[in-house]
Amino acid sequence: MIIPQTQSGVMKTPDAGVDFLIRHPEPRQQILDYDTQMKWGAILEGPSAKSLWWIAYFSVFSRSGVVV
């Protein structure tokens, strides 16, 4: 799962991955790992970015076939 850039600007959160996990605790036990590429102060080009277009990714797994 990825968190894409949805708008251009300057990243204002220290770690969008941690922020996501705080706001959405339900899938936390199903996230094997994550990596945040765009952190505080990074320049976001928005959805039309040609290079690194994602902010963070999560490796999500499910033992039941359904991710909650």
Image (tube, grey):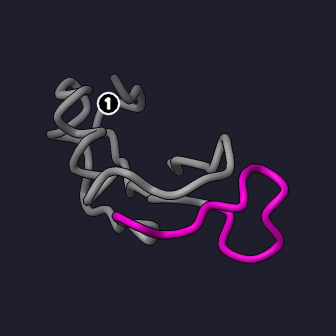
Observer-nearest residue: 58 or 20?
Answer: 20
Q: Examine the image and state in which quarter residue 66 appears.
A: top left
Q: What element carries label 1?
A: loop
Instruction: Give the image location of residue 4, x and y in percent.
Output: 61, 49
Q: In the figure, is residue 50 to the left or right of 12?
A: right
Relative image position of residue 17 (x, y in whole percent): 31, 52
Name the amino acid type tagged 1.
Answer: Ser
Count the labels in the image. Answer: 1
Q: Residue at x 83, y 72 (%)?
A: 50
Q: Observer-nearest residue: 56 or 40? A: 40
Is 19 drawn above or below residue 11 in the view shown? Answer: above
Q: Residue at x 32, y 30 (%)?
A: 64
Asked whether, in this view, residue 41 is left or right of residue 22, the answer is: right
| Numbered range of the magenta stretch | 40-53
Q: In terms of image quadrants, where is residue 39?
A: bottom left
Q: Is the magenta stretch mostly helix, strand or loop?
A: loop
- Residue name at image x 26 percent, y 59 percent: 14
Q: Is residue 57 above or below residue 43?
A: above
Q: Residue placed at 59% from the left, 60% from the top?
A: 54
Task: Report the residue that reaches farthest toward the bottom.
Answer: 51
Judging by the rendered image, the residue that carries numbered circle 1 is 64
